[in-house]
Amino acid sequence: MSSGSSPLNPDDPAGPAPGSSLTAARRARELALTVGGPAVDVLVVGLGATGAGAALDAAARGLTVAAIDAHDLAFGTSRWSSKLIHGGLRYLASAQLDVAHESAVERGVLMERTAPHLVGAQPFVLPLTPLVSRGQAALAWAGFRAGDGLRLAARTARATLPAPRRLSAVETRHLAPAVRGTGLRGGLLSWDGRLTDDARLVTAVARTAAAHGARILTRVRALELTASGARVRDELTGEEGEIRARAVINAGGVWAGGLVEGVRIRPSRGTHLVLRSDRLGPLPAGLHVPVPGETNRFVLVLPQGDGRVYVGLTDEPVDGAVPDVPEVPESDIGFLLDVLGCALEAPVRREDVVGAFAGLRPLLDTGPAGGTGPAPRTADISRRHAVLTSPDGVVTVVGGKLTTYRRMAEDAVDAALTARGLAAGPSPTASLPLVGAASPRVLAALRAPRRLVRRYGTEAPAVHALGVRDPRLREPVPAGHPVTRAELVWAVRHEGALDEADLLDRRTRIGLVPADRAAALGAARDAVGEALESR
């Protein structure tokens, strides 16, 4: 294992976890060791949540690991989610009891053991407007109670996730002031898990893998996969070479089918709108807004705490070639605004939408081969993940969702070990804290702004200290946004950011609003340039 194999100490707030820092220099050094070098035990292709999770799982078992991605950490679907860690309520409604239970278990793992700094409890209000019948309200209430049963079955503490309860009309307006008051007869309060940011979770997983010896190699494209490795290209230099491996895991998400024959992916597009917080006023809780004509589908209003609100999400099939960055069609924007307008006092107009993003869910196509017969709606396709082993032994993991990334990774590594006859112990990741994780007591005692603690955990004081030493780094980028120059510098020095897009679109989410991105571009260029000069 590399020098990054020191164990993590989640209660030490002194700075980066030993061996966890990802830098351009480390990438270059480890890429030179990997391409054309001795075979690693496991090669992982794809550095979204599942791929980064597989790299961590394998490295934590003591295996040598290389993990590559053609772009950046969390470049694909893993940065376009609702930022929620779901407990599986939706899957109860469709009788997918195993998927529901797995989701609830993994939610508890993240909230209480592996990432309590990044995942917290999020309240949601379902306002009982005249458009919500009493029958629908009764069904929703039964669902929330069943969801609390899932929490209990998963052994997640009540202190972590409070119980659902009924709200009076006055309480509903207090938690959701933007909701239309005419005819409002109350509301239903429920709780679920919520990420500070999905791309930050992937970064934490990848850095934790690096701390256990995994080589995290971004900008390395897999051109061809076999069970004994991959032909790859360094996207920064154009140089090609071979990475040899004893086992190969394809975690390419919506692109997985292009790497291994026989894997059929049916992408589904989930779109979110970005609004300024002042457009909706104070939002102490998120909102569940029922979609008219659907019994178990909601549009979510998700306050982010950074001056923005997300509104999502759609579930539409996508045909044809898979783009690197999905476009948001006007039809999706119109649908979300129409549903939102059913519940709000003042309608949200198209000009209020300051940004929008879409992600493609990598759903396993279970329809008839060859395209014969009717295909199911993507909203009806199971979110159960699948681990597939090709005839020559390449393991592909597809389906699933962000909440269950750890279990997906564990299953993929188990399958790869079996397929290639490798020996390793059981997965330790259910109790392995990610970089920055610590107990609530330790996190509460950290001397750093609460916003930084929610994003960096025990590393927050070190990020804050950058601005203490250099007042210029305390400046927000852009003006009016909470992200500071210190966070950009930290991302280049420790989080593997190689260029301005890495900084603005993934390490921070400034880029979700094009106007903010343009205003912050100069600061991002400065951060990258200063890091190169200091090498």
Image (spheres, grey):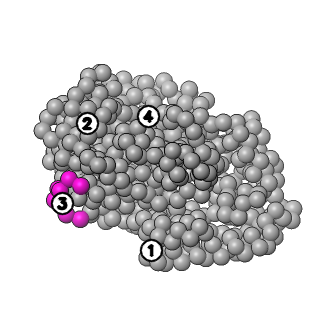
**Residue that numbered label 2 is attached to:** 230
Q: Which span of residues is magenta-colored?
A: 419-426
- Tell me residue 162's x, y (percent): 55, 73
**Residue that numbered label 1 is attached to:** 154
In three-dimensional space, the C-alpha distance between marks 1 and 2, rounded to whole angstroms, equals 39 Å
**Residue that numbered label 4 is attached to:** 503
Would residue 213 appear left or right of 374 to someone viewing this image? left
Sequence-wise, which precedes: disc 1 or disc 4? 1
Identify whether 369 is placed above or below 92: above
- Tell me residue 517's x, y (percent): 55, 30
Residue 160 shows in this picture: no
Q: Secondary structure at mark 1?
A: loop
- Tell me residue 253's x, y (percent): 43, 45
In three-dimensional space, the C-alpha distance between marks 1 and 4, rounded to whole angstroms, equals 36 Å
Identify the amino acid type marked 3. Answer: Ala
Identify whether 376 is placed above or below 515: below
**Residue that numbered label 3 is attached to:** 424
For disc 1, the neighbor class at 10 Å (few under 14, some 14 to 19, many from 20) is: some
